[in-house]
């Protein structure tokens, strides 16, 4: 039995990047303190604000829900709500949506559910039939982001919290390089408040490795989280990058953190350039867009024509 470095209980994890063995309690403490520190350092959250949590019911967003409630639940003047997008994926989303509802209710956080079917007329399964399985993930990502921002504004949210963890963020950064889309590194910066028309995002799990988010969710008895991965998920490039990064991290612990530190140095420079390139409003939906018609509306139009 390997013991915790901080007490004499059994260790449940070795954090390779820090070299520490931690028991359940000290592991929880490590995750929670990293999240609190990240929030304090990067986001200003004030009395009177309304914060939305993008809650799929998967492990990442469920952890965000509980931890933000732990941190801010006692604040009298701060309102937490959760937003669940029901894409309409039969046999997959039902359980996760139940967890989203159940845990929101348990914490007395109002849960708003918006469905693709009601909002754009098609469920994701329906989209899949029209555009083919391989394109479905892309449609889903664009429409989900669009819907979340639109609803966040309708609900008057000051910020929206998303569940992206250290692995998601470092994979995205590396993908931006491999595709030559380094201007997109800007979107990985912690500060998104300068983007007109977008509700600023906060990423409480940005400093937490995926493996630790999973272990945290499994070892907190008060959480119900969904662990399956989406049947439409497009693992082609991201899956490759994930393997490369995980292998690299094994030999060079801390590499994922290094990538994020690099993004933080680069993103402000990119922002200086892109800030001047003003975003327009989409002529059809009014959401921010680089073109006259936003990507989501283009896809919606394509669907109607098919
Ligand atoms: Zn301990
Ligand atoms: Zn639009």
Image (cartoon, rainbow, N blue to C red):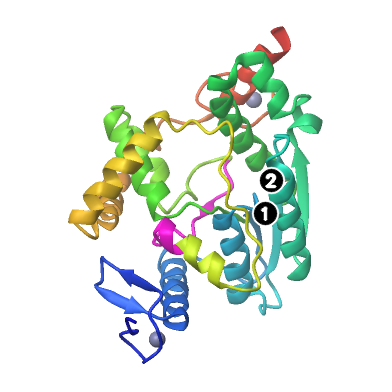
Return the residue found at the far top: 305
Answer above or below: position of 162 versus 33.
above
Circle 1/circle 2 CB separation < 8 Å:
yes
Give the distance between the C-alpha atoms of the residues marked 1 and 2, in whole angstroms: 6 Å
| Residue 275 location (% of width, % of height) | 40, 38
Asked whether residue 152 appears in the rendered view, the answer is yes
The quadrant in which residue 287 appears is: top right
Binning the other alpha carbons within 10 Å of mark 2 as few (below 14), some (14 to 19) or many (20 upward) gives some
Say which of 37 and 107 sits in front. 107
| Residue 37 location (% of width, % of height) | 41, 72
Magenta stretch: dominant secondary structure: loop
Which residue carries the number 2 mark?
153
Q: Is residue 204 magenta?
A: yes
| Residue 154 location (% of width, % of height) | 74, 45
Return the residue found at the far left: 251
Determine the quadrant in which ligand 2 lies: top right
Picture quarter with the C terminus? top right
Left or right: 152, with 137 as reference point: right
Answer above or below: position of 139 versus 228.
above
Which residue carries the number 1 mark?
157
Check disc 2 and report its element: helix, strand or loop: helix
Check disc 1 and report its element: helix, strand or loop: loop
Return the residue found at the far bottom: 8
CB at disc 2 and ligand 2 closer than 8 Å: no
Answer above or below: position of 302 versus 68.
above
Q: Which residues are magenta?
A: 198-212
Residue name at image x 42 percent, y 54 percent? 190
Q: Is residue 72 magenta?
A: no
Say which of 135 and 147 sits in front. 135
Picture quarter with the N terminus? bottom left
Left or right: 287, with 106 as reference point: left
């Amino acid at each position: 039995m390997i013991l915790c470095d901080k007490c004499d209980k059994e260790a449940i994890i070795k954090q390779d990047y820090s070299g520490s063995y931690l028991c359940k309690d000290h592991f929880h403490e490590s995750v929670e303190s990293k999240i609190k520190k990240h929030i304090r350092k990067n986001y200003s959250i004030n009395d009177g604000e309304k914060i939305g949590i993008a809650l799929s019911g998967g492990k990442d967003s469920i952890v965000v829900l509980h931890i933000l409630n732990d941190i801010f639940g006692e604040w009298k003047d701060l309102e937490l709500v959760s937003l669940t997008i029901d894409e309409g994926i039969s046999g997959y989303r039902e359980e996760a949506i139940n967890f989203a509802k159940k845990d929101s209710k348990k914490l007395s956080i109002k849960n708003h559910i918006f469905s693709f079917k009601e909002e754009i007329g098609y469920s994701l399964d329906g989209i899949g039939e029209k555009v083919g399985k391989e394109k479905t993930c892309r449609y889903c990502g664009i429409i989900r982001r669009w819907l979340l921002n639109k609803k966040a504004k309708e609900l008057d949210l000051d910020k929206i919290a998303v569940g992206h963890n250290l692995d998601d963020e470092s994979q995205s950064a590396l993908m931006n390089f491999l595709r030559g889309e380094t201007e997109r590194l800007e979107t990985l910066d912690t500060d998104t408040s300068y983007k007109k028309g977008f509700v600023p995002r906060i990423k409480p799990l940005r400093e937490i490795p995926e493996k630790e988010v999973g272990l945290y969710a499994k070892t907190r008895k008060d959480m119900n989280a969904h662990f399956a991965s989406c049947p439409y998920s497009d693992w082609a490039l991201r899956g490759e990058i994930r393997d490369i990064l995980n292998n690299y991290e094994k030999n060079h612990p801390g590499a994922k953190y290094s990538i994020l530190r690099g993004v933080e140095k680069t993103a402000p420079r990119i922002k200086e350039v892109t800030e001047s390139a003003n975003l327009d409003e989409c002529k059809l939906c009014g959401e921010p867009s680089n073109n006259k018609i936003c990507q989501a509306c283009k896809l919606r139009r394509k669907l109607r024509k098919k």
